[in-house]
Structure formats: structure tokens, C-alpha cells
Image: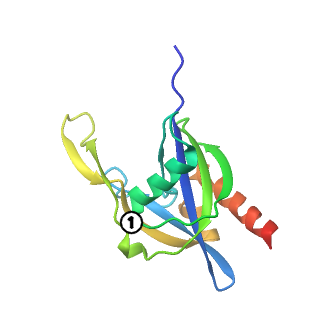
């Protein structure tokens, strides 16, 4: 029996700050992630079904996880495969936000693991602007190619 491939779609918001590019990343919420920092941040993303356009899902997920507005045009960044086997399809867009104003949706998780107890957690506990070099330290390793592709696409537009 074949395992169903999990797919997510996400958006990487960037802004120009002085002579550099900064990207907005999120830290996952909940007790499992509370002490994990470098290498655990992510782009806002979420799963989508076969009946939903990936870009539409990416926009929905970004807004659900941050409550920030999204602006076209979108730069297609392609996909990456995470360690879990999940494929993440991503786009970038230019925008700006105040990280302290982030409002995330919530989800229910079992905590502690295998305890049968459910707790409600925010999907995201914080967001932050990162320089591209600093983002490479904090972003999930599998998502770094998305950052590299953004920088290549922006360089080709100049």
C-alpha cells in the first residue's frame, strides 16, 4: 500500500532594508518546540488537498498563521522535500509587518506525547525578521534552498 504524499504550500515574505534583504520567519508553537531555536524556524506554510490550488493554500496558511496581509506579485520558488518526506511548494512576496503584532491560529496536540491528554497551542509562537545570512542559521535546513532561490530571483530582476 502506498503512503499518501503530504504536501504543503507556503509564502516567504521579504523586505528591502537599507542595502540588504530581510526575510520573515516563524517559530513553531507548543511545548515540543519551546527550547528549539537555530535550525527550527520555518516559512509560514500548511497542507493542502487535491481540490485546492497551492498558491491559494499558501496565502490562506500565511494569513491564518500570522494575521498579516499578503501582496502580489508572487515569485515562484519551487519545492523542497523535508526530512519527513513532506514536499513544500513556496512563493515569495515583498511585504512588511511588525512581528509583535503576529496573531496565530491554534491547534490541538497531544501533550505529553502518548499521554492521551490534549492541549491547545498556537501554531506559531513568534515571528521575526532575519538578514539572509542569519536566516540560514535559523531556518530549517531543508528550506534553505527556498531562501537561496529567492536571492537568485531577486538578483536576476536587478
Q: Which residue: 46% across, 57% down?
A: 62
Q: Which residue: 35% across, 56% down?
A: 29
The residue that label 1 is drawn on is 126
Q: Is residue 50 left or right of residue 111?
A: right
In the displayed orientation, state which residue is furthest to the top: 1
- Image quarter where the C terminus lies is bottom right
Query: Is residue 135 shown to the viewer in this render?
Result: yes
Q: Determine the image quadrant of residue 150.
A: bottom right
The one nearer the camera, 134 or 3, is 3
The one nearer the camera, 44 or 59, is 59
In the displayed orientation, state which residue is furthest to the bottom: 18
In the displayed orientation, state which residue is furthest to the left: 117
Residue 128 pos. (x, y %): 47, 70
Residue 124 pos. (x, y %): 37, 58
**Mark 1 neighbour class, 10 Å CA radius: few under 14, some 14 to 19, many 20 or more:** many
Q: Which residue: 63% across, 45% down?
A: 80
Residue 79 pos. (x, y %): 65, 45
Q: How many marks?
A: 1
Residue 15 pos. (x, y %): 60, 75
Q: Determine the image quadrant of residue 71.
A: bottom right
Q: How is the image coloured?
A: rainbow
Q: Is residue 32 left or right of residue 42?
A: left
Q: Determine the image quadrant of residue 73.
A: bottom right
Query: Is residue 30 shown to the viewer in this render?
Result: no
Judged from the image, the secondary structure of the residue bearing numbered disc 1 is strand
Amino acid at each position: 500500500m502506498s503512503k499518501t504524499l503530504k504536501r504543503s504550500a507556503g509564502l516567504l515574505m521579504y523586505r528591502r532594508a537599507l542595502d540588504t534583504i530581510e526575510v520573515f520567519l516563524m517559530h513553531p508553537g507548543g511545548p515540543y518546540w519551546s527550547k528549539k531555536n537555530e535550525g527550527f524556524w520555518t516559512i509560514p506554510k500548511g497542507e493542502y488537498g487535491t481540490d485546492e490550488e497551492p498558491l491559494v493554500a499558501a496565502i490562506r496558511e500565511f494569513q491564518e498563521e500570522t494575521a498579516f496581509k499578503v501582496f502580489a506579485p508572487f515569485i515562484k520558488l519551487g519545492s523542497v522535500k523535508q526530512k519527513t518526506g513532506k514536499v513544500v511548494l513556496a512563493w515569495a512576496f515583498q511585504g512588511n509587518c511588525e512581528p509583535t503584532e503576529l496573531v496565530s491560529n491554534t491547534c490541538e496536540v497531544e501533550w505529553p506525547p502518548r499521554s492521551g491528554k490534549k492541549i491547545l497551542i498556537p501554531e506559531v509562537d513568534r515571528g521575526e525578521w532575519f538578514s539572509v545570512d542569519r536566516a540560514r542559521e535559523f531556518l530549517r535546513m531543508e528550506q534553505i534552498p527556498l531562501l537561496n532561490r529567492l536571492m537568485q530571483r531577486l538578483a536576476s530582476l536587478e
